[in-house]
Image (cartoon, grey):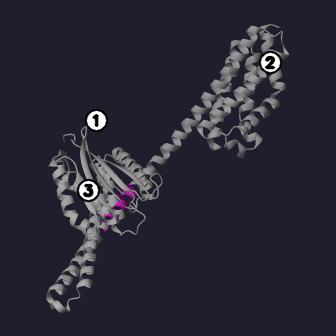
Amino acid sequence: MTPSATLATLADELEDRRDAVLSAWSLAARRDPGLTTPATLSRTQFFDHIPAMLDALERKLRATALRDSLEAKQDELEKAESHGLQRWQQGYQESEVMREWISLSACLGDELAAFAARHPDASPAGMSSAWRMVSEFTIAGMSESVAQYTRLQRTEAAGRVQALEEALERLNELERERATLWREATHDLRGNLGIVRNVANVLQHSLPREDVPHDPLKLLDRGIGALHALLDDLTIQARLDAGQERREIGPFDAAAMLEELCGAARLAARQRGLFLHTAGAPTLPVDGDAVKVRRIAQNLLHNAVSYTREGGVEVSWEAVDAGPARWTLCVRDTGPGLGSASDAPLAVAMEAATRDTLAVEARAEAQGDPAADASAAPTLPSQTSAPASHGEGVGLSIVKRLCELLDASVELATAPGKGTTFRVTFPSRYPKG
């Protein structure tokens, strides 16, 4: 059998076995777990332009003149482009378009192998040409279909950009309005609370000593103090939300600052029957925002003392030798700990806060907005399963947000009944400017 006769015979048999080829392709596609869209299509919708493309392939196999071959190839490409359009309209994913072409290529390969087995007298040169034409058919068809699909997808995406930008701008506007309302509400609350505190002080000092209800007034004073602390936290949270917090970098002694902070907290720890130990170098000169570092340490220390019932708290600091210049602050308590280090609500919330912050930062870079790194982030839940005051979640949220602002990282380690450890790693040096 001559090469041209081999190709013509193959074209005739492919035409006769068209239904079998298409059925095998349909079955393979429906069995592919990566193809879900074909299951929603009818047989005619699934086959689409492929039968017409197979017609062009068969004409090319039979062609004896170059012109006929080129016309058949051009017809293949036009049908492949239309096929890509149809697949896009049918809701295919780009990967699905490629996977179904791979399935069709396999089915045609099986047909060529079966043809060679039925015709041992087929010309080797003819079979080689047949394999090349079928490979070109599937590769060109896949390329053109996917290219058309991609072009349409990009056109559709471009049409959405303006609407998305408008929606994003409206969202930013609402966020700015929310932050403004936060600040105004917090300011009003602080003013009203100051009036209540002044009245309590007047009562405590104006009533005769024997008539002063000391316990209720002390409870009132402690409650007012707690509310003041909460409002301080809410004020910082509002400033972070509004993008008004900026880091002010300068040199300071982290060890001296932490010793002073822990010294002030020891009285509260002793009143609860707890120890408060410190460990670290006597001096630790670093660059950073001393006010914000102090706030981070203060919130972590407050939580540790508040939730620990037996034992105490250890605060340590040290310089990190490896890598870039950094130093760590560690606050470890002997409290009840969390349910599980891997799935504790705080651990999950911290991971979510990190993802949200990174997403916000990416959006800020795209918009050229240096203040957007302080946009809204989730409020973290309280440290332990013990009853918490309303301020603990806000405090931990502020820790996370301030750490992001200072390019610091937060690590959490915990175990039920064995306490909780927060480790914060700060840069010791920041880029100039």
Tell me how far mark 3 sits from mark 2, CA to CA: 80 Å
Is residue 35 found left or right of 239 in the rendered image? right
Say whether marks 2 and 1 touch (CB < 8 Å). no
Q: In the rendered structure, does residue 171 fall within the stretch colored magenta?
A: yes
Residue to which mark 2 is pinned:
10
Q: Earlier in the sequence, mark 3 or mark 2?
A: 2
Name the mark nearer the viewer: 2 or 1: 1
Judge whether residue 242 can be spotted in this image.
no
> In the figure, 347 relative to 197: above or below?
above
Tell me how far mark 2 sits from mark 1, CA to CA: 69 Å
Amino acid marked by disc 1: Ala
What number is the disc on residue 322? 1
Residue at position x 26%, y 61% from top?
275
> In the figure, 386 relative to 249: above or below?
below
- Local crowd at mark 2 within 10 Å, few (<14), some, or many (≥20)? many
Give how far across and how far down residue 312 sits, in percent: 30, 61
Q: Main secondary structure of the magenta part?
A: helix
Quadrant of the rendered image containing residue 232 = bottom left
Residue at position x 34%, y 59% from top?
396
Name the mark nearer the viewer: 3 or 2: 3
Residue to which mark 3 is pinned:
297
Amino acid marked by disc 2: Leu
Give how far across and how far down residue 154 sits, in percent: 51, 39
Q: Secondary structure at mark 1?
A: loop
Q: Secondary structure at mark 3?
A: helix
Quadrant that contains the C terminus:
top left
Give how far across and how far down residue 213 sits, in percent: 23, 88
Extent of the magenta region: 169-181
Residue at position x 27%, y 56% from top?
296
Residue at position x 67%, y 29% from top?
102
